[in-house]
Image (cartoon, rainbow, N blue to C red):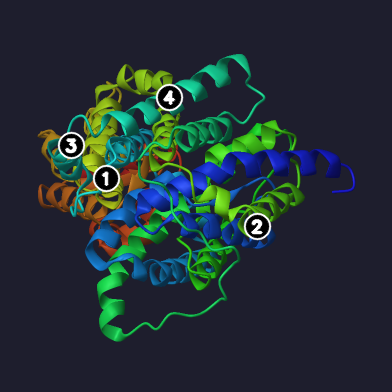
Amino acid sequence: MRRYWKGDIAAGLTVGVVALPLALAFGVSAGVGAAAGLVTAIIAGLVATIFGGSNLQVSGPTGAMVVIIAPLVATHGGGVVPTLSILAGVIVIVAGAAGMGRAISLIPWPVIEGFTLGIASIIAMQQIPNALGIAAPDESNTLKATVQSFAAAQWPEVVAPLTLTVGTILIIILMSRFLPSWPASLVAVVAVTAVVAIFGTNVPLIGALPDSLPAPTVPDISPDLLSQLLPGAVAIAILAGIESLLSARVAAGMVKGERYHPDRELVGQGLASVASGMFGGMPATGAMARTAVNIRAGGRTRLAVIIHSVFLLAVVYLASTVVSTIPLAALAGVLLVTAFNMISFSTARTILFTTRSDALVFCLTAATTVVLDLIWAIGVGVAVTGVLVLRHLARQSGVYREDTAEHRRIAILRIDGAMFFGVSDRIESQIPKLESTDVVILRLSRVGVMDATGAKALADIALTLREAGIEVLIKGIDISLVALIEEVGVIETIGGRDHLFTSLDEALREAEAIVERRATA
């Protein structure tokens, strides 16, 4: 901090300026109001940076979280959001304390990019009512709500809000191109708000905001309400963990030598959501866009994020009246640009043209996110990826004969790949009929993965050979798998541990001795 404090202060102010319109827009889009979004950015940003595992992460309300919260608000009402925030925060804390921070590495890249595309699509669709100047339909499914919004739009009443939305988008695009160092979103919102004030345009506004932070309270949670909200809280917790860890990992990669602690990051984000809920805010996650702005603006320590929260706090106490006059159409424009910027077209192109399996997972995850929800999307994406990986492993597994002329009554069978439930039947069927054979050496040095089903298949293979009067020797099995094959009876079937060998020469010598004994018997 002694080294970077000047850059941190500048970065904190920059991030605060960028975060202000986003926090307001996300609160409105979630259905809980602009004040809740602002409170979340202040409280969660401060708590997460103090207790989290990243020096660079900026936390607050995000579009991905809005995607989950909005349907829950439509079902249960906005009053349950603080409770949801606390419940989800507790779950994330437990996950961090249990050391689940590394679990993010288990989610495949096409799944992550797929639900990012789906989230961006949903965020864009959620802005349609505000862009058209109408009330959001009472429908939890965003796709259906979008269709209903277009059906309910009345011309020419929608011309004014739609013009403001398009104007906001154009200002952001032009400023990002010609004045990239300026806070384009904030300038666009200020300009559109000024136009509405000057011309007296009748469009929906944010409305009254509190001029101070509310006192922290713990909402009452009855057992009945807990059972209703728990599934939603789990979904929020999963998304909060995934998004925060992804953002922290990307942020660490943007600065040379920077690291983050995933488990501590989960604990910090969980505490941030709990604190946000106590102040009436929303669940929070690490925000990739604001984190990237922080890094590009020179932020290198937690001081930058603290300054960002202090700046937003000053807005609450000093400028809440001005902020209340912002048109909702302007916030819709900001989030439409945000949704577009979330999509990496080069990444999507890369995935679509790599393998058909990755393209399938990517498209299926994106479609499931839009049609169903994020948790279904992640589950479906991971499940399909798992099936495709197992299919690939199964194709690489097989049995190959390596007989030599010098050992005519000895058969050498090499098993390659993994022996698991997906390939065990096929491996068994590939064992050839062995005529005039006294000994079979099973070479397992290329078997790196084996589960109980695979071990049972090995036991069945050995039993079949023994019943045919053929001795079985095993060469090269990994020492970590010996206990497994012993448990399912493989070693007992082949005649004991003295039938296990580490080198082929030793196994051949034993096989020759068996052949010789049988010949003289």
According to the picture, the residue beneath numbered tag 2 turns out to be 313
Amino acid, disc 1: Ala
At a point 25% along the width and 30% down the height, the residue shown is 363
Residue 153: numbered disc = 3
Q: Earlier in the sequence, mark 3 or mark 2?
A: 3
According to the picture, the residue beneath numbered tag 1 turns out to be 377
Mark 4 surroundings: few (<14), some (14-19) or many (≥20) residues within 10 A: some
Q: Residue furthest top?
A: 178
CA separation, marks 2 and 1? 36 Å
Which of label 4 and label 2 is nearer to you?
4
Which of label 3 and label 1 is nearer to you?
3
- Circle 1 SS class: helix
Which of label 3 and label 2 is nearer to you?
3
Residues at badges 3 and 1 in contact (C-beta under 8 Å)? no
CA separation, marks 3 and 4? 19 Å
Mark 1 surroundings: few (<14), some (14-19) or many (≥20) residues within 10 A: many
Mark 2 surroundings: few (<14), some (14-19) or many (≥20) residues within 10 A: many
CA separation, marks 3 and 2? 37 Å
At a point 27% along the width and 49% down the height, the residue shown is 379
- Circle 2 SS class: helix
Which of label 2 and label 1 is nearer to you?
2
CA separation, marks 3 and 1? 31 Å
In percent of width and height, residue 239 lies at 40, 53
Left or right, 478 with respect to 512, comes to right
Q: Earlier in the sequence, mark 4 or mark 2?
A: 4
CA separation, marks 4 and 2? 29 Å
According to the picture, the residue beneath numbered tag 4 turns out to be 167
Amino acid, disc 4: Gly
Residues at badges 4 and 2 in contact (C-beta under 8 Å)? no
CA separation, marks 4 and 1? 34 Å
Left or right, 498 with respect to 90, comes to left
